[in-house]
Each structure stands twice: as structure tokens, then as C-alpha cells.
Image: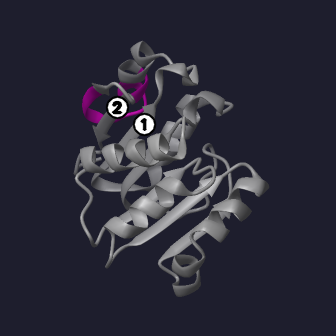
Amino acid sequence: MTGKDKRAMAEWVLSELAVEPTDRILEVGFGPGLGIEVASAATSDGFVAGIDYSHEMVEMARKRNAAAVETGHVDLRYGSADEIPSEDAVFDTIFSINSMQVWPDAAAGLKEMRRVLKPGGRIAVAFTPIAGQSQDELRPLLTRVGFDDIRVEKQEIGICAIAEKHMDS
């Protein structure tokens, strides 16, 4: 994927999530930080956090988003999807692009995402067709870990599963 394609993917995913300017957003597996950059621009009065398992990607993303990191609008940390360094129910929106296929345990990562998501919050898991993730696995996996109102959207650029954590969860 080119940088232009990655930006288009991040913009598409965030539009599917109907991000609001005041949202608290988490990206799991942010890579070089392009999705963080797009999320930061969409949340003028919110907050954007990210975790990535690569120290190199954390440094690269911090450089890309230096101004937002400096002001405290963005917080980027080293971390794993199955142990998100956060309190429970703090994020309105969580997304992951081309990342889940490299998690040691996808179900554990999704459970952690659900734990840190506020009731009524939304998640998106997206990937390109060549990323090695099967779309057939997504809906049952999201259901199994407790997400509701699951829908799968497809575009030429990729596949995106969007789900919600119900208010009573």
C-alpha cells in the first residue's frame, strides 16, 4: 500500500466510525502513525491514543505527530493488543488497520479493546485483502468476544468490520 492508500484507508475507517470532534480514540497497531494523524485531525476537542508492539514504529509515529504529541492531544505508547495500558471504558472509538493478523491472540486483543471501550462505543477492524486476514472470521470472532451490531463494509481498498459495545455491557 502506498502512503496515499494508507491515508485513504484511515479516512474511510474513521468515516465508518462516525468520529466526533470530542471523541477519545485509540488506534491499536498504528505503525508509522498515519492513522493517528488522520484521527488527530478529526478530533479537534478530543484525544487520540495509540499502542504499537514495535519500538521503531512508536518512534516513527511520534516524529510524524510531534506537534500533537507535544500539546498532549496525542499519546503514543509501546504496547500489545492483548494488554492495552489503559483503564476500563475510556475510549469512544477504537480502530485497527492491517494489524490484527499479527496479534498473538486476536480474541484476547478484541476482548481488551472491548474492555477499554465505553458503553455505546464503536470499534473498527480493517484490512486490505492482501493483509492475510479472513473476513469470514471477523463477524463470529467479534460476536464471541461480546460486540453487537456488527456490520462488514467492503471497498476496493479493503474490508472493515464495525461493531458496538452496547450501553448495558
How busy is the neighbourhood of tag 1: few (under 14 within 10 Å), some, or many (20 plus)? many
Q: Position of residue 129 (x, y in %)?
A: 47, 20
CA gap, disc 2 and disc 1: 5 Å
Mark sitting on residue 144 = none
Residue lying farthest to the bottom in this orientation: 71
User: What residue sits 49% from the left and 60% below the top?
Assistant: 36
Q: Is residue 96 visible?
A: no
Q: Residue at point 34% right, 31% down? A: 161
Residue 93: x and y, percent? Answer: 35, 55
Q: Residue furthest right?
A: 55
Residue 74 placement (x, y as % from top left): 51, 73
Residue 131 inside the magenta-drawn segment: no
Quarter of the image with the N terminus in it: top right
The residue depicted at 41 percent of the width and 51 percent of the height is 94
**Disc 1 designates what residue?**
125
124 or 128: which is nearer to us?
A: 128
What secondary structure is marked by label 2? strand
Q: How is the image coloured?
A: one colour
Q: Which residue corresponds to the image point at 30% horizontal and 27% vertical from the top-left? A: 155
For the residue marked with disc 1, what is the amino acid? Val
Q: Is residue 88 above or below residue 1?
A: below
Tell me which label, 2 or 1, sits earlier in the chain: 1
Q: Residues within 10 Å of mark 2 (few under 14, many from 20)?
A: many
Residue 164 picture quarter:
top left
Can see residue 74?
yes
Q: Which mark is residue 161?
A: 2
Using the image, determine if residue 164 lies above or below residue 84.
above
Is 106 situated left or right of 137 in this image?
A: right
Quick check: marks 2 and 1 in contact, CB under 8 Å?
Answer: yes
> What stretch of residues is rendered in magenta?
141-153
Drawn side of residue 22 relative to residue 82, left or right? left
Local SS, label 1: strand
